[in-house]
Image (cartoon, rainbow, N blue to C red):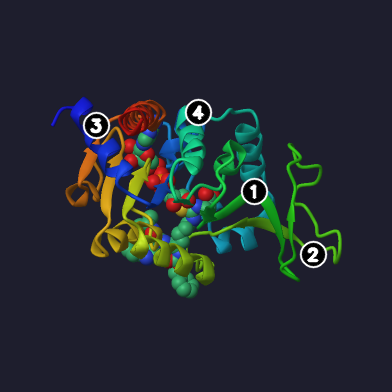
Amino acid sequence: MNTTEKHRYAADLLARSDHIVAFTGSGISSESGIPTFRGKDGLWKKFRAQDLATPIAFSTNPKQVWEWYDWRRQLISEKNLNPGHKTLAEWDNFFASLYVITQNIDGLHQKAGSKKIIELHGNIWKLRCTQKGTIIEDHTTPLKEIPPKCKICGALLRPHVVWFGEALDMALLNQALKLSSHADLMLVIGTSSLVYPAASIPMTAKESGAKIIEINPESTPLTPHADISIRGKSGDVLPQISEILKQKVQKNREKKK
Ligand code: BV8
């Protein structure tokens, strides 16, 4: 199947689906200029995860960890949405149910207007008190104080994100797994499918009978299990599929007249 045929087939499958889940990774934000993790100029090429995205790193050197997250907040705050984020948000009005389950902490799906979002790994714009667990939302960049302190009890605040070696929020993970097992179709967009337990979500959907459409310029461990794997950038591919979908709906409307 050539790319155009794949886009048509993807639009067909979408048009026949009611319960859709879009599972996204850092690739969907890369066309906005936000580095991925493992890409050629990815974050893990410049920084060591174990020094910056683990509870040990934070307890050892909270200032260094916060400097890194403050740098990422500033970077994200300067970037714009891309057609990939926007198309998924538009599709909220297209399908009976469309959930976005994301590994991204950049908050761009919210910014695009997607209504039903599960952030498996947290959100960089939320800070959590290490003492009381109070969560506050703060979009100031740069942060006035590094490391920031809780205004209620004065304790250290930490980014409200999931670090390596830390458990995900079980309620969120179970909700994501439940949605995946009830999905007719899952779009897997811009993820290397290497980080667990998040990477088990597409397979949960597959094993429950969902169709899998992967969108990624490169193949991944999930590719052999996908019904369609489209080699391309999500900012190009999603709007192209959306165009075909709109024509389909238009044609059906004319037929009914
Ligand atoms: C835990 C938040 C236990 C912080 C993140 C099983 C097997 C092996 C290892 C493990 C396992 N189970 C657990 C582990 C350990 C670990 C893990 O998975 N390690 C990996 C590296 C092997 N998992 C954990 O530690 C998890 N916790 O297991 O706790 C536990 C249980 C109970 C009690 C106590 C403890 C926690 C994992 C979460 C870590 N936090 N982020 C932050 O961001 O600072 S993970 C972070 O990395 C992201 O959130 C994301 O999940 C991951 C990066 O993956 P991607 O988003 O896919 O990015 P990547 O760069 O890899 O790929 C980008 C893709 O996009 C590429 O394929 C590229 O081709 C594509 N692309 C590029 N441009 C485009 C594009 N696609 C489309 N369009 C484009 N334009």
Residue identified by numbered label 2? 155
Name of the residue lying farthest toward the front: 257
Query: Could you tell me which residue is drawn at 54 percent across and 52 percent down?
Result: 116
Query: Which dot marks residue 161?
Result: none
Q: Secondary structure at mark 2?
A: loop
Nearest-to-viewer mark from 2 and 3: 3
Quarter of the figure that contains the C terminus: top left
**Which numbered disc, 4 or 2, marks the residue closer to the eye?**
4
Q: Relative to 128, is 132 above or below?
A: below
Q: Are marks 1 and 4 in contact (CB under 8 Å)?
A: no
* Left or right of residue 169: residue 20: left
In-image side of 194 versus 58 (left or right): left
- Up-down relation of residue 157 to residue 69 (above or below): below
Which callout, 3 or 1, points at the residue further toward the start of the chain? Answer: 3
Circle number at residue 64: 1
Label 1 element class? helix
N-terminal of the pair, mark 4 or mark 2, is: 4
